[in-house]
Image (spheres, rainbow, N blue to C red):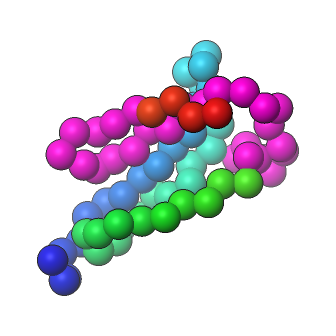
Amino acid sequence: MDGINQRVSVNVYNLAGQHVTTLINNESQVGQFYVKWDGSDKFGKMLPSGICLLYTSPSQRDRTRARM
């Protein structure tokens, strides 16, 4: 699928539904992506340990997944 582009975004939310940070939000070629998150919020402050929700798009279906 060389040359096909799509908008890719990965957002992190806490269990209260509040946006914590955006890990990716850009136009990229279709394919696999690897994301490393250091556990900080959008202001650079480290978050306490716990559960967060990752919302990814696009895909055949947008997805939300819980992560610890």
Location of residue 8 with respect to 46 vertically, above or below = below
Does residue 19 show up? no
As drawn, the residue found furthest toward the top would be: 16
**In this view of the protein, which residue sits in the foreground, 32 or 12?**
32
- The image position of residue 34, as x and y in percent, is 49, 64
Determine the residue positioned at 83% across, 43% down: 46
As drawn, the residue found furthest toward the bottom would be: 2
Q: Magenta stretch: residue 51 in it?
A: yes
- The image position of residue 18, as x and y in percent, is 60, 25
- Most common secondary structure along the magenta stretch: loop
Determine the residue positioned at 31% across, 60% down: 7
In the rendered view of the protein, which quadrant contains the C terminus? Answer: top right
- Left or right, 14 with reference to 1: right
Q: Magenta stretch: residue 41 in it?
A: yes
In the rendered view of the protein, which quadrant contains the N terminus? Answer: bottom left
- The image position of residue 43, as x and y in percent, is 78, 47
Location of residue 15 with respect to 31 vertically, above or below = above
**In this view of the protein, which residue sits in the foreground, 39 or 21?**
39
- The image position of residue 33, as x and y in percent, is 42, 65
Does residue 45 show up? yes
**In this view of the protein, which residue sits in the foreground, 67 or 45?**
67
Q: What range is drawn magenta here?
A: 39-64
- Left or right, 49 with reference to 65: right
**In this view of the protein, which residue sits in the foreground, 10 or 67?**
67
The number of discs equals: 0
As drawn, the residue found furthest toward the front would be: 68
Determine the residue positioned at 76% across, 47% down: 40
Determine the residue positioned at 61% across, 16% down: 16
